[in-house]
């Protein structure tokens, strides 16, 4: 259902960064973004390793070190709820509960239709708007039940329009 | 003394962030032009006179750092701007990069000129990917107008700035881990010495400063070090961007001169404006998760690096998280410790295992299962972690705990007796770990 990128697309991303080893993080983030499943598969990790002339283990070292990467498929939209102390005291756990109730999944899980994954994240630098969540690069602040319902509906609509 | 002084946030919200024209209209690039007519060492002297203390958390004197790098002869040298901003409760570098990126660029360019460096790197955390685009646009426009790139303003000096992205790792804010990450590796800290001024990025001499530190450089160059110093206190020059969050009325970023009091910060109507929901102030957490917590008795402490240190507090990143009486100290510390467990890079035992053990004891406290022995163990563990962790993350992970043990020992005692003064523990079911 979620489109997989072509090999050419991946090579294009690597070329955009001039095949530079120090751009590994940027390359992997871009690949993850177009992956359709919010992860970097072994297939693409191998391709990156080959193109940048790095051992595969180095690529996996990076993929498993940084929190933004996943090597396992996730939902099309990863919802990350900030759970660091400033948001926690602004009731981030209530926000997490609302998301879980609406989506019918627990934290760490993905909805059966493959649309949403729910995760906690460390501070995303929007503590003045807490409680906050991030979906892709977009940050949603001052969350409450009404807003969360709106956000979920918005993403569902985008998807049904794409069909 | 006025409680708000706008030196480095003056343009924020007033100019188009990527517009060189707007920036020039607001006095931008006057400092770079002036700098080109100064000797590098003269500029360093001004930074020293300004008593600019690093704004990334450690408050290290920028002038001394610059002088040390200047004395090293090897080249090339690299300029690195730390925009990892991972300390929970901190969002001031974001403001500068989002609303006045050219000021940061100008500061980095002056540094480039001082060290005859041709490449500057700004490492922006992955969570700020949107902002990376704004910053790139500002770089591109500066280049078009001749303020970056080859032969800047016909001086013969060439300098470029490269944006590097993070991908979610708090430890990468530690300066040596930052350099590893810029090199495209996992961001585990390096052993020091050698210092980064000697062996830094790509093993070359390197300057690492925080976004806000660089943003201050143009002001110091235009106004002079002495004038800059006079905005603050005798030991902490200038102003500080503070980030207010938690149970405070006015959340957000504010620029204050060093020398205001903590009371001003929290209660002044132009700053924090007091508590959000009319509840009582219980404590506030300063400088990020790795900083100490402060009790209301310390409200009259002067906000400057020395006075804060003397009071056992710290300016740190500028985070001020305000907590009201509904918060339980133990429950709060569990959250803090959870953060460090998650962010520990796992390289050394005291941090990797220590934080987990601290959490277990805090958890026991919150369930009324802890004993005096546990408390003693916790204190010892905290000492061991502070003394033997490999990098600043583990060394500072128990700072908040230590400060709470000092100011709120009765609350720890109460939990030993299965009582939670805030009514948080023993009543709610754990919502899963
Ligand atoms: C675990 C850890 C995280 C840090 N995170 C940051 C950060 O996000 N931003 C920052 O500027 N400095 C951070 N620092 C401090 C840097 O190591 C370094 O001192 C700073 O970037 C130097 O710049 P300054 O002197 O201008 O403050 C961190 C330090 C540690 C130990
Ligand atoms: S203290 Fe040790 S385990 Fe913790 S982040 Fe630093 S190097 Fe890694
Ligand atoms: S603590 Fe949630 S955004 Fe900073």
Image: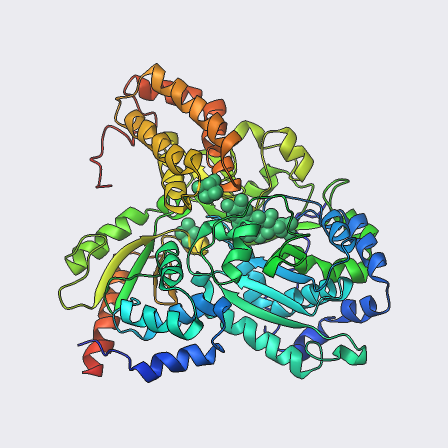
A37 or B138, which is in the foreground? Answer: A37
- Residue B139: percent from the left, percent from the top? 61, 75
- Seen from the viewer's position, the closer of residues B390 and A2 is B390
Q: Nearer the viewer, residue B13 or B375?
A: B375
Q: Is residue A95 above or below residue B38?
A: above
Total number of numbered discs in the rendering? 0
x 69%, y 41%: residue: B259
B217 on left or right of B267: right
Q: Is residue B210 left or right of residue B187?
A: right
**Camera sees residue A58:** yes
Residue drawn at (20%, 68%) of the image = A115
Instruction: Give the image quarter of residue B333.
Output: top left
Left or right: B152, with B282 as reference point: right
Measured as percent of width and height from the top left, residue B350 is found at 43, 33
**How far across and how far down the image is residue B122, in percent?**
58, 64
Q: Answer whether residue A41 is visible to the viewer in this image.
A: no
Looking at the image, residue A22 lies above or below residue A18: above
- Quadrant for the N terminus of chain B in the image: top right
The location of residue A7, given as percent across then percent down, is 31, 81
């Amino acid at each position: 259902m979620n489109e997989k990128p072509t090999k050419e697309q991946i090579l294009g991303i690597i070329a955009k960064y001039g095949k530079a080893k120090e751009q590994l993080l940027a390359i992997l983030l871009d690949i993850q973004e177009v992956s359709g499943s919010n992860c970097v598969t072994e297939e693409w990790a191998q391709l990156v390793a080959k193109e940048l002339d790095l051992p595969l283990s180095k690529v996996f070292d990076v993929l498993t070190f940084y929190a933004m990467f996943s090597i396992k498929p996730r939902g099309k939209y990863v919802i990350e709820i900030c759970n660091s102390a400033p948001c926690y005291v602004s009731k981030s756990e209530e926000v997490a509960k609302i998301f879980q109730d609406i989506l019918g999944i627990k934290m760490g899980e993905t909805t059966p239709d493959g649309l949403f994954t729910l995760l906690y994240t460390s501070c995303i630098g929007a503590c003045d708007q807490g409680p906050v969540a991030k979906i892709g690069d977009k940050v949603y602040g001052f969350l409450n039940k009404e807003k969360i319902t709106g956000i979920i509906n918005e993403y569902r609509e985008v998807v049904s329009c794409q069909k | 003394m006025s409680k708000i002084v706008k030196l480095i946030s003056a343009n924020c919200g007033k100019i188009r962030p990527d517009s060189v024209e707007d920036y020039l209209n607001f006095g931008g690039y006057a400092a770079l032009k002036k700098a080109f007519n100064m000797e590098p060492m003269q500029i360093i002297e001004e930074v020293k006179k300004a008593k600019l203390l690093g704004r990334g958390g450690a408050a290290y004197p920028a002038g001394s750092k610059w002088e040390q790098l200047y004395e090293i002869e090897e080249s090339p040298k690299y300029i690195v701007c730390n925009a990892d901003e991972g300390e929970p409760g901190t969002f001031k570098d974001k403001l500068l990069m989002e609303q006045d990126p050219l000021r940061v660029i100008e500061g980095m360019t002056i540094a480039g000129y001082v060290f005859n460096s041709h490449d500057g790197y700004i490492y922006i955390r992955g969570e700020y990917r949107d902002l990376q685009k704004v910053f790139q646009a500002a770089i591109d426009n500066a280049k078009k107008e001749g303020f970056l790139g080859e032969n800047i303003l016909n001086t013969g000096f060439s300098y470029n700035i490269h944006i590097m992205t993070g991908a979610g790792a708090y430890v990468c804010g530690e300066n040596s881990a930052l350099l590893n990450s810029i090199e495209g590796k996992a961001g585990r800290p390096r052993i020091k010495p050698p210092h980064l001024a000697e062996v830094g990025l790509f093993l070359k001499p390197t300057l690492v400063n925080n976004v806000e530190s660089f943003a201050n450089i143009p002001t110091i160059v235009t106004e002079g070090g002495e004038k800059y110093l006079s905005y603050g206190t005798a030991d902490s020059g200038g102003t500080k961007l503070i980030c207010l969050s938690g149970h405070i009325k006015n959340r957000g970023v504010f620029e204050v001169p060093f020398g205001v009091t903590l009371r001003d910060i929290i209660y002044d109507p132009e700053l924090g404006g007091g508590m959000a929901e009319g509840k009582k102030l219980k404590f506030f957490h300063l400088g990020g998760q790795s900083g100490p917590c402060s009790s209301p008795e310390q409200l009259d402490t002067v906000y400057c690096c020395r006075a804060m240190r003397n009071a056992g507090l710290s300016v740190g990143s500028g985070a001020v998280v305000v907590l009201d009486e509904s918060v339980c100290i133990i429950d709060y510390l569990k959250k803090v410790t959870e953060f460090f467990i998650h962010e520990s890079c796992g390289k050394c035992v005291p941090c990797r295992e220590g934080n987990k053990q601290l959490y277990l004891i805090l958890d026991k406290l919150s369930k009324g299962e802890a004993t005096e022995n546990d408390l003693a163990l916790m204190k010892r563990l905290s000492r061991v972690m502070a003394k033997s962790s490999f990098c600043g993350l583990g060394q500072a992970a128990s700072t908040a705990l230590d400060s709470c043990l000092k100011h709120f020992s009765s609350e720890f005692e109460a939990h030993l007796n299965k009582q939670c003064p805030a009514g948080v523990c023993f009543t709610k079911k754990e919502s899963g770990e």
